[in-house]
Image (tube, helix red, strand yellow):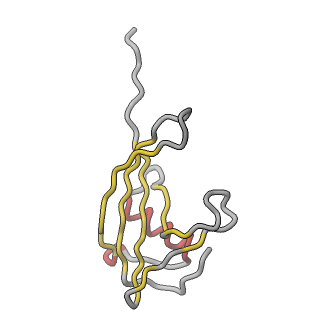
């Protein structure tokens, strides 16, 4: 039996650049256990059987309490990157899609 090689895997994530009055929304992380106190965009991992756009719509509701329409999302950038947390952990390959939205429904709230 031949050696089984590990398949190449990407960790997919969606990010939201929410723009209003020439300002970009940043959320402050708190009580998450991961980089608490730091600022970042509304973002999250794409789940199984979910595309980047649907993930962004879901994450916007979960993290910022807003409803996005897919027609109001514009892909701004796609980033492929490698991440190495420490020398004992294998490199994780990531693919990130950044969306711009200038329209949404609901009042923004850091969830």
Q: In this view, does 5 lie above or below 76?
A: above
Q: Residue at x 55, y 74 (%)?
A: 27
Query: On the image, which quarter does residue 50 sit in?
Result: bottom left
Q: Which residue occupies the foreground of this view, 37 or 42?
A: 37
Q: Which residue is drawn at 55% across and 78% down?
A: 65
Rendered-image quadrant of the C terminus = bottom right
> As drawn, is 43 to the left or to the right of 111?
left
Rendered-image quadrant of the N terminus = top left
Image coordinates for residue 39, horizontal then vertical, percent? 55, 70
Image coordinates for residue 70, horizontal then vertical, percent? 35, 73
Query: Residue lying farthest bottom?
Result: 21
Query: Residue lying farthest front?
Result: 87
Q: How many labels does the image show?
A: 0
Query: On the image, which quarter does residue 83 sit in?
Result: top left
> As drawn, is 59 to the left or to the right of 19?
right
Image coordinates for residue 52, horizontal then vertical, percent? 38, 60
Query: Residue lying farthest top?
Result: 1
Image coordinates for residue 57, horizontal then vertical, percent? 44, 69
Q: Residue at x 37, y 51 (%)?
A: 95
Q: Residue at x 40, y 14 (%)?
A: 3
Q: Which residue occupies the foreground of this view, 110 or 61?
A: 110
């Amino acid at each position: 039996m031949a050696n089984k090689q590990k398949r190449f895997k990407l960790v997919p994530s969606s990010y939201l650049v929410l723009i209003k009055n020439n300002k970009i929304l940043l959320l402050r992380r708190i009580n998450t256990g991961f980089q608490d106190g730091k600022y970042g965009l509304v973002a999250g991992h794409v789940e199984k059987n979910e595309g980047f756009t649907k993930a962004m719509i879901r994450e916007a509701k979960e993290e910022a309490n807003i409803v996005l329409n897919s027609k109001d999302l514009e892909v701004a950038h796609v980033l492929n990157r490698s991440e190495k947390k420490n020398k004992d952990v294998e490199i994780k390959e990531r693919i990130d899609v950044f969306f711009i939205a200038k329209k949404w429904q609901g009042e923004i709230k850091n969830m």
